[in-house]
Image (cartoon, rainbow, N blue to C red):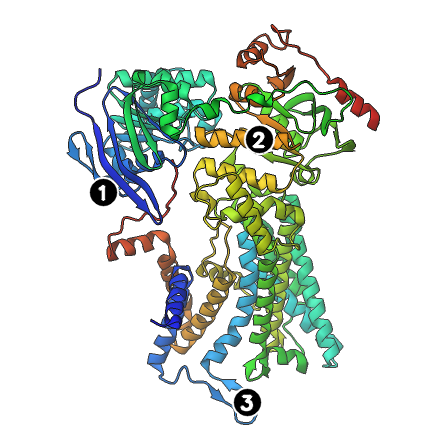
Amino acid sequence: MSNTSSGAASFLKTSVKQPYIWAIAALVLLLIINLIKDPTYLGISVNAVTGDLSGNLIDILRASAPIMMIAVGMTLVIATRGIDLSVGSVMAVSGAVSMEFMHDAGDGSLGSALMAIALALGISAFLGLINGVLVSIVGLQPFITTLIMMLAGRGLAKVITSGQNTSASNEFFRWIANGTVLGFPVVFLIGAVIVALVALLVRRSALGLMIESIGINPKAARMAGIRPVGLLIFVYILSAVLAGVAGIFSTASVMTVEVAKTGFSSEMDAILAVVIGGTSLAGGKFSLTGSVIGALLIATLDKTIVFLAIPSSATPAFKAIVIVAICLLQSQRVRALFSQRRARTSTPRKEAVSA
Amino acid sequence: MAATEPIVEMTDISIEFPGVKALQNVQLRLYPGEVHTLMGENGAGKSTLIKALTGVYKIDSGSIRVSGGPRQFSGTADAQSAGISTVYQEVNLCDNLTVGENVMLGNEIRGAFGINWKKTHEAAHEALVGLGLGDLDPRQPLSSISLALQQLVAISRAMVAKSKVLILDEPTSSLDANEVEGLFTVMRRLRDQGVAILFVSHFLDQVYAISDRLTVLRNGEFVGEHLTRDLGRSQLISLMIGKDFETLASLGSNRRRDARESGEQPFYSATDLGRKGSIDPVDIAVYPGEVVGLAGLLGSGRTELGRLMYGADRPDTGEVTIGGKSTEVHSPVAGLATKIAFSTENRRDEGIVGDLTVRENLILAVQARRGWARPLSKREQKELCDKYLVELNVRPSDPERPIKNLSGGNQQKVLLGRWLATKPELLILDEPTRGIDIGAKAEIQEAIATLAEDGMSVVFISSELEEVVRLSERIVVLKDHRKIGEIINGPDITADTIVDLIASDGAEAQGVEAFEPEPAALAAEGSTN
């Protein structure tokens, strides 16, 4: 046996143990279903003139970028035993702020695009700060706090645009969602870089350890000298800023903010991506990789629904079925049932060796 | 009294977990009408054996016979329906339900329109009377009664399920002497009714007070089954730890030093340190290299005082001087910053972070001190792990294992390592040896003595007075949330001295010098003001 094959085997072995292995399996399955319907589904063509790649896979990457942003933010919030229901509304606020600013500026310059982005992210961060302060200092429940922000944010977006769906034209801003670099969609590349930066930030510093500690056992974490207030404010701000980025992504593709629709029920997609990725809603251990895979799965699922021409009224049901199936496959109990059937092993799942 | 036929007979039980032989050829026989104690260090396999019996774990080899026939249960519910009930160390009841509902849970009496609550509560009352708990109102919420009574409620629940075998896994570890006596009365009553009781406890006195027969395990192996009356205490301890009792007995006996020279500065001193509803204002001083014991009964305020000193609870009153400087310690962060560390008595809820690894738990406090932006490097983490896992003899010494998979004693050692890694000058240990076996206890006591030799101040809180007397140079005695005296340890001070002091409530007990404020502490206070 060569080294590479045993290395691959051990890699396979460790990734099979990851809860998100089922999300990967589902992702592959969806692609296979699409492939059966249309054998050229996975084909990627290269535009001879511009060098742009195009194809369904590229579309999926493009569509997954905003979900990836909010899913990563949501992962960290959920790891602290919280939840952030306001991400969809923050997306709308961010989109409204940037569109309104560029519409008023009207010059379509790079400067006004950058200014719009800075303004949108700044206001998103402020909304996140409010969430964080209410949760950590005031001590409100995250569910209630962010539910209020979800309603208030949607209202704020409408106030900003005076209830209108605002459009603007700005080439640079448009390029974010529709442009390509080396053939790949810019939006996906920016998303990937942001995810990598966040991952580096939490895993290379002690943030990840501290977030997990307060999620697993807040009392013990406090006794060990960890200050939860700063950490909580940080995760809510990060979640909101990432939602702001997602808002920019999704409005830039059409250069219009639809205040009632932009980011609508996106919090659900984010929470689902997190759960599919194997992070427990009870908080504690989290997996950013899992959430990214979850986001890819949701984007694929959305595309597949359209591709299979499932009637729009049945879409939510179809989505629900797929997600329930994945969650079932991930549950310890169901997996234990399967492994017992396969081989009647007597190894208990929790091997606590204690007296 | 023992019947000839055992009701439970486990023969040659072996269980293997990945990498660990948890049990190897272990035997256990339970006879009706007998209290049988399962003895062994932490990690000896006591819990595993119980879980093998109740079907939580599947056995790899061996046989289990119940009432004469071979049985293999599929879980606690299955075992319970066959008459084997377990009451765990941490009471598994529903806090939000009433006493009666808890007793009858799963056995409610049903009428034409669902559950008949009146009859259910009556039946609960009967069950409680059966255990001599007739005074308990079954309609009272469970959360309103003490932990000891909750334990008895758990036992009545087992009796309602008509159990023939009752397993009590360390039921006494958080009870005080009177409550233990109450539990024993109930146990004797059940024994006389012909119930077979399997009892697990770390307290030797209790084992000798209650059990008829005992089985000793060591490192997952069967050491022997003995009638309690045939086996001396030191013999039993030797069987459990596999080494001589001498090493234990000699431990810490040289800790009794002369009283402090006057004029030396205490590391920590506080005047009028108090918190409403938790402890009345107390004066306390701890000198470098000194072990100060806090003695008192459960609920005397000994834990509360330790928490105030660390800042786990915010004090309302008091002036604190640390290292000669007037300071305020109102949070654990502030406590750690002033070089104080506090090891909690509540290991599971306030100590370990269960899903994290041993390594992550060990470095947590040091990392918290450094802040999130300055993570410990892999090398520094490894150094800390290597140092403390070896020094404190943590088993298994694998730093990447989740801490929740370690036995209680080893979790405690990891936590001790967590605090030592912060290089504290004052270490407050609240019940560091509770619920852990004699071997680990000796190791922890030894570690404390060595730390003090090296100049660390230690505040030692324990419900075992002998332990306090053995380790401390000075003992602060508490009762009913206030300090009733302070004893300088000496050759003629014993646990009885403290008991007398508590009994006479702070009045001058025999041979005890009870004095209020420490003169040196006052001097230190004066110099800073």
Depicted B24 relative to depicted A236: above or below: above
Nearer-the-camera pick, B138 or A118: A118
Label 1: chain letter:
B
Report how far apart the C-alphas of labels 2 and 3 lie in the structure. Answer: 71 Å
Which residue corresponds to mark 2? B448
Mark 2 secondary-structure assignment: helix
**On the image, which quarter does residue A187 sit in?**
bottom right
Nearer-N-terminus badge (1/2): 1
Amino acid, disc 3: Gly
Which residue corresponds to mark 3? A51
Q: Nearer the viewer, mark 1 or mark 3?
A: 1
The residue shown at (27%, 20%) is B34
Label 3: chain letter:
A
> Which quarter of the image is occupied by the N terminus of chain A?
bottom left
The residue shown at (38%, 77%) is A308
Dot 3, crowdedness within 10 Å: few (<14), some or many (≥20)? Answer: some
In the rendered image, residue B321, in percent from the top left (x then y), is placed at 75, 30
Q: Nearer the viewer, mark 1 or mark 2?
A: 2
Mark 3 secondary-structure assignment: loop
